[in-house]
Image (cartoon, grey):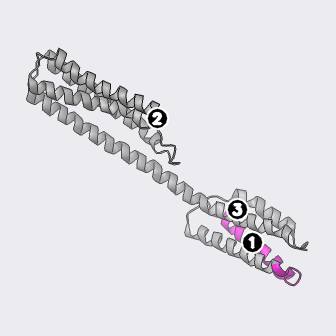
Amino acid sequence: MNAKTIYKILAILIGYGLIIGGFFLFGQSLEDRIKVLDIIVSILVYTQLVQFAIYPLIDLDNPAHKEVGMMGIYFYVLSAYCILAIGLMFFGIVYAIPFHIQLMGQIFLVFLGLLGRVTTLHSGDKVEHIYNKEQQMKEGKVTLKIAMDSLMDEIPQNQPLNISMRKLDDIYEELRYVTPSMSIEAKHYESEFCQTIEDIKVLMRNADLNQEKIEEKINRLERILSRRKNINS
């Protein structure tokens, strides 16, 4: 635990102490049960606010950054709860509102705050779901590029080939125009593309003998990629 964390914890604890001590010093005229209720509510409000000093607004370890989608609703709900809870305490003291009314009012506000929190978490889950879906859609395109990279990397390791490098270069460039998709048809063509590349790599082990077959496979790569590019969703 570093010094920054220690000072942060001390500041938070002193804040709790000031809240409790303030009520006992300046709230002597309050009925005991109202005083206890107001202390609990004040601590609850304070805890909601100081959590930002403990937990970061955005979890940098989670690439989905779902907190961004939650932030607007969360700040609105938190602000509304804090203002209403403090307002009820204030008017309860000024107008001597009976304890049972204050208690039910504070419980109702906590209930609304919890509902708001549930809505906030739902929004965060939705953001994370969309992010995960987009990542899954991109995986197919990345797989094609990785497979093509592996093929292009192997070519210089062999003897000079009489194959159409121009076609391979064109295929590599055309991968940029593949639209991410999660459809079954897209996955089929992606799998077929990768398998064809593996076939070419096997044939290249004896390139002179398999020259014609390699060209056929390269032409097949072109056809598969063309069909995959036609899938837009």
Q: Is residue 153 above or below residue 65?
A: below
Q: Residue at x 28, y 42 (%)?
A: 115
What amino acid is found at the position of numbered circle 2 in the picture?
A: Asn
Q: Position of residue 210 (x, y in %)?
A: 84, 83
Q: Is residue 213 magenta?
A: yes
Magenta-drawn segment: 205-231
Question: According to the image, label 2 marks what residue?
Answer: 2
Give neighbour class at mark 2: few <14, some 14-19, many 20+ (Cα, 10 Å). few
Distance between mark 1 and mark 3 Cα atoms: 13 Å
The answer to whether residue 125 is left or right of residue 116 is: right
Q: Is residue 28 above or below residue 228?
A: above
Q: Is residue 18 above or below residue 136?
A: above
Q: Main secondary structure of the magenta part?
A: helix
SS for dot 2: loop
Q: Position of residue 154 (x, y in %)?
A: 80, 69
SS for dot 1: helix
What amino acid is found at the position of numbered circle 1 in the picture?
A: Leu
Question: According to the image, label 3 marks what residue?
Answer: 145
Question: According to the image, label 1 marks what residue?
Answer: 221
The answer to whether residue 23 is left or right of residue 70 is: left
Q: Quadrant of residue 211?
A: bottom right
Quadrant of the rendering where the C terminus is positioned: bottom right
